[in-house]
Amino acid sequence: GAVVSQHPSWVICKSGTSVKIECRSLDFQATTMFWYRQFPKQSLMLMATSNEGSKATYEQGVEKDKFLINHASLTLSTLTVTSAHPEDSSFYICSVRGPTGSGNTIYFGEGSWLTVV
Amino acid sequence: GENVEQHPSTLSVQEGDSAVIKCTYSDSASNYFPWYKQELGKRPQLIIDIRSNVGEKKDQRIAVTLNKTAKHFSLHITETQPEDSAVYFCAASTGSGNTPLVFGKGTRLSVIA
């Protein structure tokens, strides 16, 4: 069954509005979650590392004020794309490292397709 | 930080032939190397992984080899089938709790029937 759940799967929003994407760890607590962005025909690019109870760590070139990450609990991280623009249209996907004893397995959410019109 | 290079970017093979995709990494501390298959619009699916304490791992038609000295690892798919057509990504990580996977740029594999 699913280990990581991501919602919504698809979202269309107008330019200038904000969109929130949720990533939930279903079977275990996750102090760290990772957010990736994937443009068409490109690889998964790490945006930020979400840390429960503390500030996210953003990769170089990712605007922290535009991509707000909140990891308020051990099972939920949210990514909010603020003041969205068409160039923010992309596939956003979260991942979680499995619990101790699962090896280094990384679990991915289903991903969220964002289209900004 | 870690940098992962993947080649080739596209690969076409005849059904039944073998396909090989190669990756190199830069961080000698990396010790976990998974391979993912991704179909359009879907999440990456783990197909095989290898850890730094082994040099080769096989699962039916899929195998992965790792050369830690040279910092490269490869995916081998034998007896390819049309349903193997997808984009494949290699990745590397140090494996600790708060370190992410770093992905290669992907290889689009087309298996021609």
Image (cartoon, rainbow, N blue to C red):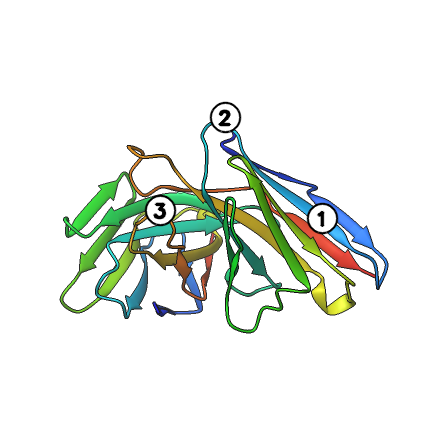
Q: Is residue B112 visible?
A: yes
At numbered mark 3, what does the secondary structure look like: helix, strand or loop? Answer: loop
Query: In 3D space, how far apart are the residues under numbered discs 2 and 3 (Cα atoms)?
Result: 22 Å
| Quadrant housing residue A65 | bottom right
Q: Which mark is residue A1?
A: 2
Q: Position of residue A112 (x, y in %)?
A: 65, 48
User: Which chain does the numbered disc 3 sit on?
Assistant: B
Q: Which mark is residue B95?
A: none
Query: In 3D space, how far apart are the residues under numbered discs 3 and 1 (Cα atoms)?
Result: 25 Å
Marks 1 and 2 share the same chain: yes
Q: Position of residue A24 (x, y in %)?
A: 57, 36
At numbered mark 1, what does the secondary structure look like: helix, strand or loop? Answer: strand
Task: Identify the residue under disc 3.
Answer: B97
Q: Amino acid at mark 3?
A: Gly
Front position among marks 2 and 3: 3
Q: Which mark is residue A20?
A: 1
